[in-house]
Image (cartoon, grey):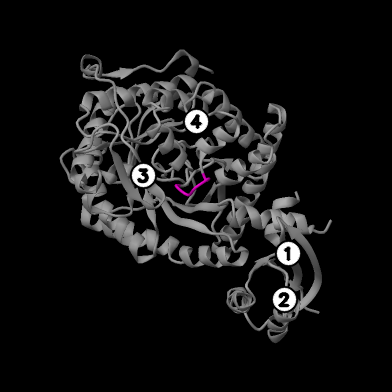
Amino acid sequence: MPISPQEILETIRMIRMEHLDIRTVTMGISLLDVKGDSLEILAENIYKKIVEKAGNLREVVEEISNKYDIPIANTRITVTPIALIARAKEDDDLFLLAEAMDKAGEEIKIDYLGGFGALVHKACTACDIALINSIPRALARLERVCSSVNVASTKSGINMEAVLLMAEKIKETAELSADRDSVACAKLVVYCNAPEDNPFMAGGFHGVGEGETAINIAISGPGTVRAALKRLPNANLAEITEEIKRTAFKITRVGELVGREISAKLGVPFGIVDLSLAPTPEEGDSIADILQAMGLEECGAPGSLAAIALLTDAVKKGGVFASSSVGGMSGTFIPVTEDAGMARAVARGSLSIEKLQAMTAVCSVGLDMVAIPGDTPVETIAGIIADEMAIGMMNNKTVGVRIIPAIGKKAGEWVEFGGLLGRAPVLSVSPFRSEGFVRRKGRIQAPLISFTN
Amino acid sequence: MCKTERAVVTVIGKDRVGIVANISSVLANHNVNILDISQTIMQDLFAMIMLVDISQSDADLSELRKELEKRAEELGVQVLIQHEDIFRFMHRV
């Protein structure tokens, strides 16, 4: 059946007027075979492998973007978590390895590289500790490198010592970039149940179960969903769900097409399309605005969890059928600074950190891009992380914490990051202390629901 | 016989004399064959949609886009050229 003019115009409207674009094309690269007798040699070999595998990635991404006249916002690389290949002692500084990643990214014109991280959901090795201690300086000094550390999983519980350690590193990272509203924290995620094929940053890494390379795609489509719902002011919930499913199908198809073509051109296997609705600070490209279009006065109003649960589920139902392989995070992102509507909801007093955290229980994907006062104690940050990890662990889902203690700022003052990272007011945090709990040693054990065998 | 490779040219703007002639002449200059042409109205704006064969074109898509955009600017309209697969993929399984 030929394509009708209405269908052509619908596609154009989605891209030109409703901010439909490809958020990122991310190439995963395994570093499991990369070795070196010294850190210097290992760094050199990491650099070489990234450049060798992804040398023409940028060029191919631009070619495909051009072919369909669809914007592709970022080109990214994920690698095997560096702690798995570094073979370091506890007090080694692994900055050199992060620097090698950054240098490779600069050489081949990549926006971000993820994987300067560790998997410590049960316990830390000496090398994990060395890596985690190297994170603050790497993120503060280098432009492109992102870190994620998985500190919990449904199968192994929550490594509370790692939670506290990560809270300390978040604070250090904030202090090292205090002159830029502590923006380096935007490149650091603490995870429960981290996915191995995540194209998004800052949490993306190339998991150990992955192949040599893969192309993973993420789409940005909140603007199209919002516009579709705005056209249905009097629809009932079933009609809203259908409309979201239809829209999700269409935007996912674009991701599938771009992914297939880039993978074929590069001769790299196509990994997944991530179904997540990822907002941008552009006017209207907002999850909060979708909730408004569904009838809530503001994001955070009672009913917000129900609305976002409907949205997330409908996006998945529409998207799964559109792609040969869905993966990554595939939830709904509610990053406060990156979504102008979320930032507005905080400024209006509709959205608290507690409400946000409750929303993450139904929509994935964690407390994201949340600025908190710079003088928040490390133990309070650890408590916030532990709570979020518990949501992920008990519900068998992925959650992350990307929190920014904005040094020198108080609740209500704004942080300004610019670009895709956006801006938002600093949220207030409970003054009640968590110290006695988070400083206990050990691990919260795996919950009963993990015993499914 | 060469395989056809098709793109969709869309012109959006206020209707006026010479849009079809001007856009077609850019395409003809590069040996791009027009296979189908239709007109419709989108939110009060005139929209012209052309299905074209670019397999024999002496310019690639980005060069064509540049020239079309230059001409469109003179006409006070917007023009897009996109490989047809994006429409096929989005609207058909």
Q: Residue at x 35, y 28 (%)?
A: A121
Instruction: Tell me the residue that label 2 is attached to.
Output: B19
Badge 1 crowding class, 10 Å Cα cut-off, few under 14, some 14 to 19, many 20 or more, is some
Disc 1 sits on a residue from what chain? B
On screen, A373 above or below A155?
A: below
Q: Rounded to the nearest whole Å, what is the CA distance between mark 3 and mark 4?
A: 18 Å
Q: Dot 4, crowdedness within 10 Å: few (<14), some or many (≥20)?
A: many
Q: Disc 4: which chain? A: A
The type of residue carrying mark 1 is Phe
Mark 1: secondary structure = strand
The answer to whether residue A44 is left or right of residue B58 is left
Q: Earlier in the sequence, mark 2 or mark 1?
A: 2
Residue identified by numbered label 1: B46
Magenta region:
A281-285
**Amino acid type, callout 4:** Glu
| Marks 2 and 1, how far apart at CA | 11 Å
Q: Kindly state the secondary structure of the residue where label 2 is placed.
A: helix
Going by the picture, which residue comes out furthest to the bottom? B29
A86 sits to left or right of B86? left
**Disc 4: which residue:** A298
Which quadrant of the rendered structure holds the C terminus of chain A?
A: top right
| Membership of A18 in magenta stretch | no
Disc 3 packing (10 Å; few <14; some 14–19; many ≥20) = many
Looking at the image, tell me whether mark 3 or mark 4 is earlier in sequence order: 4
- Of residue A118 and residue A184, the one placed in the foreground of this image is A184
